[in-house]
């Protein structure tokens, strides 16, 4: 008698989160459907294009069809008479990608961190606040994230060698950089895109964001240092104590053979790298708006352009620091890339290859901004943006500015899970949330702060982040352990951010 064949059990198809492109395109379709349902309307605007409250009126409907849906990302890039294009933001993202590609080719950042670790040999506990501050600066200025993966194989042996564990090493780079993103000052992928959507400069609100950065990184450094000191005294308190012997075999290697020291060329690249972001920040801060007496850069620009021959040689269209926008800072990163090429004595072919490779790494981010802008295109062309704003104006009529900004922060937490791309989230939603803030007397720059604080908060724990999962994979740490470790810190950061936003809304 032949035995019946037993079919192997079918594997369950696990749900896989769609990409940011798919999510954004689905939102465009949903918005297009809503243009057939939501009444059309418009607001009167002033000369600057800002809406005037209490001027809403009904207009003829303009429902969006299939053609409009597929045209939306295209118009989202180039713009039309109703919606500005994302081309300036996308080009900036590509150029800064090229700049980072050139810098990474020199290995100046990697060797710079390694040099700091060597310099503090024997005083490794000081590495926790120092390196967390450096990583936070990277996250706050240029959105440092994936770049941290390279540092874990270096940090884990050092931290374990002095009695800490792999969680401390992961915390230094991961929490440091992502808290920096939470309190981004001029991060082009968060602050830049959101500010551009609201037609404000990334320098608006920069001082308050610096305060938030100091508060959140201070809390984070205390949290990590407290945990490190606890397990130094009693190793059994470590959340990964059960794999301590395995970790020692995996990570503890001889550190006698120190890597080569940084070359003078690499040191020059690091100075230029830091100078680039300092100049960018100086260029974006509206100095004359802070104080009518702070006109030094404008006066210096006029004096420089007035010098015979030199003024024309430098460029008659040169603009002073404090009045820069995306065109100027894009030019800055392009210029500094070329200067780094000469300082490092890089071959022209290597420069082009590294610059193009860096641009390629950021191509997806640049495109997602245009696709996300397509949502605003469909809403504006379908004449429903004003209607949604009118509903918000009516609903917010009795809401305080404090309550509005805290609810905005809470709103962006689930939205950050839905759209993990910070650039895509800003481009998709800021065009609605920002104007709503005006009805509650909340400055657009504070709405930007609330959005990026929520996005950064989520990116500390979300399993959809390649940065989180990559770091934990290198350290052999289960994400459940990471969530347990992060629970109290997440609560502290949430409360601190809510209090900060509430205070800023009052001031």
Image (tube, rainbow, N blue to C red):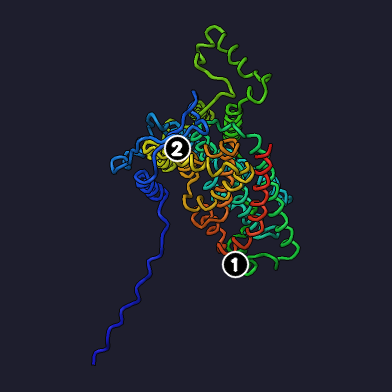
State left or right for residue 366 relative to residue 477: left
Q: Are marks 1 and 2 in contact (CB under 8 Å)?
A: no
As drawn, which residue projects farthest toward the right?
233
| Residue drawn at the location 59% of the way across and 32% of the way down | 204
Most foreground residue, 130 or 430: 430
Task: Give the position of the C terminus as an image quadrant.
Answer: top right
| Residue drawn at the location 55% of the way across and 62% of the way down | 479
| Residue drawn at the location 54% of the way across and 11% of the way down | 310
Q: Which mark is in front, 1 or 2? A: 2
Specify few, some or many for label 2: CA neighbours under 10 Å numbering under 14, 14-19, or 20 or more.
Answer: many
| Image-quadrant location for residue 504 | top right
SS class of the residue under badge 2? Answer: helix
Gap in Å between the C-alphas at discs 1 and 2? 60 Å
Q: Position of residue 399 (x, y in %)?
A: 60, 44
As drawn, which residue projects farthest toward the top?
308
Most foreground residue, 311 or 317: 317
| Residue drawn at the location 55% of the way across and 12% of the way down | 305
Residue highlighted by disc 2 = 386
Q: Looking at the image, is 186 positioned above or below residue 160? A: above
Specify few, some or many for label 1: CA neighbours under 10 Å numbering under 14, 14-19, or 20 or more.
Answer: few
Most foreground residue, 381 or 347: 381
Task: Give the position of the N terminus as an image quadrant.
Answer: bottom left
Residue highlighted by disc 1 = 246
């Amino acid at each position: 008698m032949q035995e019946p064949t037993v079919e192997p059990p079918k594997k369950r198809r696990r749900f896989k989160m769609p990409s940011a492109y798919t999510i954004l395109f689905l939102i465009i379709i949903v918005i297009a459907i809503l243009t057939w349902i939501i009444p059309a309307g418009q607001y009167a605007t002033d000369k600057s294009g800002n809406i005037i409250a209490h001027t809403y009126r009904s207009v003829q409907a303009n429902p969006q069809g299939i053609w409009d849906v597929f045209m939306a990302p295209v118009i989202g890039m180039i713009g039309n008479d109703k919606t500005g294009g994302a081309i300036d933001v996308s080009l900036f993202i590509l150029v800064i990608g090229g700049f980072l590609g050139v810098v990474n080719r020199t290995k100046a950042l990697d060797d710079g961190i390694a040099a700091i670790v060597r310099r503090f040999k024997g005083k490794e506990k000081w590495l926790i606040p120092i390196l967390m501050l450096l990583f936070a600066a990277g996250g706050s200025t240029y959105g440092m994230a994936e770049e941290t993966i390279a540092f874990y194989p270096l940090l884990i042996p050092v931290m374990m060698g002095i009695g800490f564990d792999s969680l401390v090493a992961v915390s230094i780079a991961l929490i440091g950089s992502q808290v920096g993103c939470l309190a981004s000052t001029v991060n082009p992928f968060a602050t830049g895109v959101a500010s551009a959507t609201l037609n404000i400069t990334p320098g608006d609100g920069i001082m308050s964001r610096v305060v938030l950065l100091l508060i959140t990184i201070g809390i984070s450094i205390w949290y990590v240092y407290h945990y490190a000191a606890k397990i130094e005294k009693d190793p059994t308190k470590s959340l990964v104590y059960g794999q301590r012997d395995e970790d020692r075999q995996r990570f503890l290697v001889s550190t006698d053979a120190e890597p080569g020291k940084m070359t003078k060329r690499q040191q020059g690249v690091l100075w230029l790298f830091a100078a680039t972001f300092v100049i960018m920040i100086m260029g974006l801060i509206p100095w004359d708006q802070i104080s009518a007496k702070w006109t030094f850069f404008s006066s210096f620009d006029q004096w420089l352009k007035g010098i015979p021959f030199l003024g024309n040689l430098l460029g008659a269209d040169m603009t002073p620091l404090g009045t820069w926008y995306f065109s100027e800072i894009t030019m800055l990163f392009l210029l500094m890339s070329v200067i780094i090429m000469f300082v490092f004595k890089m071959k022209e072919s290597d420069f082009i290859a590294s610059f193009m490779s860096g641009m390629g790494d950021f191509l997806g981010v640049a495109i997602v901004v245009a696709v996300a802008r397509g949502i605003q295109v469909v809403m504006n062309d379908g004449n429903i943006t004003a209607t949604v704003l009118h509903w918000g104006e009516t609903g917010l009529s009795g809401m305080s500015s404090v309550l509005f900004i805290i609810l905005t922060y809470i709103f962006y937490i689930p939205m950050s899970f839905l759209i993990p791309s910070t650039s895509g989230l800003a481009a998709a939603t800021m065009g609605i949330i920002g104007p709503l803030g005006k009805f509650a007397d909340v400055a657009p720059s504070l709405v930007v702060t609330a959005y990026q604080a929520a996005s950064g908060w989520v990116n500390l724990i979300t399993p959809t982040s390649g940065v989180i999962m990559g770091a934990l994979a290198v350290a052999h740490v289960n994400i459940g352990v990471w969530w347990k470790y992060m629970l109290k810190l997440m609560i502290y950061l949430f409360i601190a951010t809510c209090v900060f936003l509430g205070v800023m809304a009052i001031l």
